[in-house]
Image: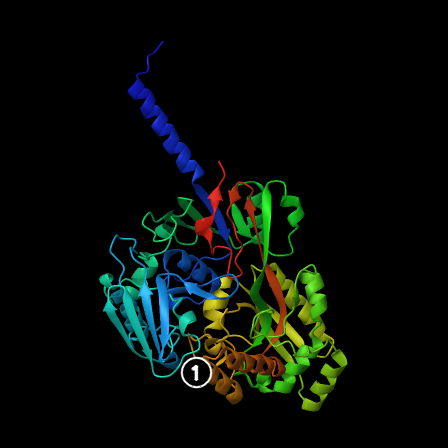
Amino acid sequence: MKRITISGFLCLLILSCALEHKKDDKICIAIDSEPVRINPLFLTDLNSHMVSNLIYRGLTTIDKSGRVIPEMADSWEIKNGGREIIFKLKANIYWHDGQKFSSEDVVFTYKVLTSPKVPSPKKGSLGPIREIKAIDPKTVVVIYNEPYGSALESWTLGILPRHLGESGIEFSLDNKPIGTGPYKLVSWSRGQHMVLEAFQKFYSKIPNIDKVVLKFIADPATRYLELRTGKIDAAELPLSFDMEKTKKNLNEYRVESFRYTCLGFNLSNPLFASEKFRQAIAYAINKEEIINVALFGKGRISLGPYPRNVWYYNDNIQPIPYNPQIAKNILRSLQVNNLRFSVSVNAENREAQRTAQLIQEHLKRVGINMEIRLFDWQTLRHRIMEEKDFDSVILSRAYLWDPDIYDLWHSSKAIKGGWNLFSFKDEKVDSLLEEGRKTTDLFMRSKIYKEVQKLLYEKQACVFLYETPLVFLAKKNLTGIDPNPQGFLYGLETWTIIR
């Protein structure tokens, strides 16, 4: 019999524990599309935002109830009628490469964002800043030309590291990101997966799970199968899947989200320029049938670009009912012949496809022929949409907790690379959005944005179809999950594996 020394036994024990720890502290999560960018200045889609938030953090963040709370800022003081904010930063914040975070990084981020060399879609998001100063390593003073209603919300923008320098920062912070968040990027196999590792110097509680693999699985059926077979630990699923079959090994998490799905129009196309024509389409679409058939009854009709139960939601909007006869009457009065257009749809989204098929049937009943064009998500979002190469599109959009939707609906943002994807332009809406940005009084802001919601709905800037909850599944040995309406990767650092 071979003898094992105490030291040898200890080595085996340590090796065994290391292997067990490595196995237990790694999870695999499936997301439906690969992040396009990670650099906080270039985020334009939900998954990019979710992943970037794990790596980069801002001075503030938004909690589940929509309130602005401190993140890297420890506190702040608002002075001079909202024209000045003094941020006090938390101590002992480090970048992923070990460098110390300071107020100079905040100033640097602002300078990069506003540089004419940097084509960021987030330009202007920090508001009318006149001057930003680093008073000491832990104090930043931001001075505005005028009060900015979304000032605190705007500083959720991820901060960039000054010590890396501005040169090449646009893409280097995608491929080799250096942030202050709870996770750092270890590797990125394009088109396949990303590997994240817990940052041991994170300024808040260090993540419980050491390693996270994010797999890019566009097909929901594949995500569903891999969940049931245990190949992945968590994933978001469409509402059309039977969650009951998964309850044995998985927990279901559901939270009212701030996503809505709409039929958006390319408003630079003369066909859609008529407000009456857009209203006719709205009357022709049976939204209840879409919810019952495409969503299995798990959604509700959307009445504009805001979620219910927030302080700026307009409860007095009267929904446009399903009435094909009114639609026919409007079309007849417009004397438009040979009504035909196409709709671009994400081929990887089963609900969007079914929604498009139902709308196609509804419109055919009033004399409109709609052709369905299918594209993978990356092509749809970053070629078809950005190049304005569409007549109409089925699109899911995320609400912002802050009511400022200037970037999404102001006419100045109807440009290539801008977020006004439908090229909506309206002087009154523009004026209200501009006024809302300058207003800090909560009651007045509420009045302004309720009017914005009312106008966007009445004008059918897009046909607001339905709202859906966020639903995802996770293995039962994962605890500490507190679903966040912003996306299911928010709060990942609090997840824990039960051993």
In this orientation, does residue 131 appear?
yes
| Quarter of the view holding residue 151 | bottom left
Q: Percent position (x, y) of residue 342?
A: 60, 74
Direction from residue 390 to residue 301 in the image, left or right:
right
Report the residue at 25% width, 57% height from top. Answer: 100
- Residue at the (25%, 70%) spot, across then down: 134
Callout 1 amino acid: Lys
Quarter of the picture containing the N terminus is top left
Comparing 236 with 428, the one in front is: 428
Q: Secondary structure at mark 1?
A: helix
Pointer 1 local density, CA inside 10 Å: few below 14, some 14–19, many at least 20: some
Compared with 380, 266 (above or below) is below
The residue that disc 1 covers is 438
* Total marks in image: 1
Furthest-right residue in this view: 325
Which color scheme does this rendered protein use? rainbow
Q: Quadrant of residue 131?
A: bottom left
Say which of 255 and 30 sits in front: 255
Residue 290 is left or right of residue 308, and the answer is right
**Residue 238 vertical position relative to residue 86 in the rendered view, above or below:** above
Image spot of residue 304 (x, y percent): 60, 75
Q: Is residue 411 visible?
A: no
Observer-nearest residue: 2 or 478? 478
